[in-house]
Image (tube, rainbow, N blue to C red):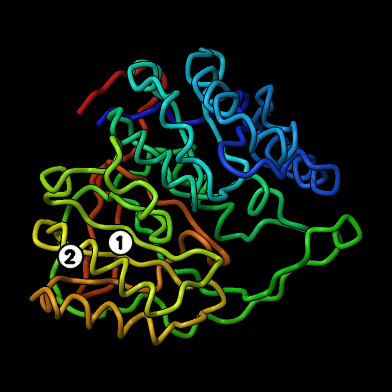
Amino acid sequence: MIKPEMLQRGDKIAIVSLSWGGLGDEKLIHKYYIAKERLENEFGLEVVAMPNALKGSQFVYEHPEARAKDLMDAFKDETIKGIFCAIGGDDTVRLLPYIDYEAIKNNPKIFMGYSDTTVNHLMMNKAGLVSFYGPSVMVEFGEYVKMFDYTRESVENILFNDCENFEIKSSEFWSKDFVPWKEENIGIGKSLLKEEHGYETLQGSGVVTGQLLGGCLDVFPMVIGTEIWPTKSEWKDKILLLETSEEKPSPDLVTCYLRNLGAQGIFDVIKGIIIGKPQEEKYYEEYKEVFRKVLKEFGKEELPVLYNINIGHAFPIGILPLGTDVQVDFTNKKISLIESPTKEKGYNKVR
């Protein structure tokens, strides 16, 4: 997999709306300006919105080809060093006919987002580029009052530094608050609760090393069978990353999704699974039972599973790199990046 260059202060990053286009809607565009100011002042980045990113949800919905053009143009622009997604949605799959995988491969740079951006991460995987499952513009960078410290530190540690042998620890705090996105709420922050669980090992033990592959479980049904869905052989020796969306799918629905993965033979070839904290901890215990039950159905009671990771739709979230070696210690409940997912400026390394 090709590693992008790490970010430096002064670098230019592009904002893209690849699914839902709400970032440009009149009632929500204040989130863009909050995020832009934060990215510039706290991280020292130059922020540019791609031409179609702020045209609003109706235009963005009607023009998947324009969304894809923004993405491809951002990759081809040598002055742009990173691409951050506005938010997820449910519509990224319509970009598939317009993606130039060679352009992505030949112009590696940091690409980050989560949720429906899972589709884009699978595009990056097909192109052979390491990508970053992490914060979005509207949610995390556009947070009212301040970013969660855990998220801000993850950005600094993983995108701006050599993080070889870096341990991704559980956040000491979490939040179940949702502050409605209205300008009059800009001064309202989220309250914090002490993390009572930390990482939990649901089954299995030992230490495994492999590349992370996966994303938002809710999104998988849209891409299974497409050109970007990995074959069984491509899942071999991977560590499966799973998290669930703000839709909080029922345990029955999660059961169906997991049985599909089992039927594809994916559980037969992966090394382990890591699972994100459910938003608001809804179905926290129920999901645990679903994972154990389905894995047992497929004879995988020893496949190691680590639960309650700060990734995806929980608050706060960190960053997990996809396509670079990660070590998961299921016995001692630790996740470590055993190699840096980025390279230094001017150092071209292809694995």
Q: Residue at x 53, y 13 (%)?
A: 77
Sequence-wise, which precedes: disc 1 or disc 2?
2
Report x, y in % for residue 17. 61, 36
The x and y percentages for residue 246 are: 56, 66
Considering the numbered disc 1 on the image, is that residue within a helix, a strand or a loop?
strand
| Residue drawn where x is 14% and y is 80% of the image | 296
The residue pinned by badge 1 equals 335
Which mark lies nearer to you, 1 or 2?
2
Quadrant where the C terminus lies?
A: top left
Q: Is residue 69 above or below residue 200?
A: above
For the residue pair 255 and 284, the one nearer the viewer reads as: 255
* Residue for badge 2: 262
Which residue is at a point 36% across and 55% down the rendered structure image?
221
In the image, taking residue 336 as reference, residue 300 lies left or right, namely: left
Residue lying furthest front: 62
**Is disc 1 surrounded by few (<14), some (14 to 19) or many (20+) residues within 10 Å?**
many
**235 relative to 226, above or below:** below
Residue 302 vertical position relative to residue 207 in the rendered view, above or below: below
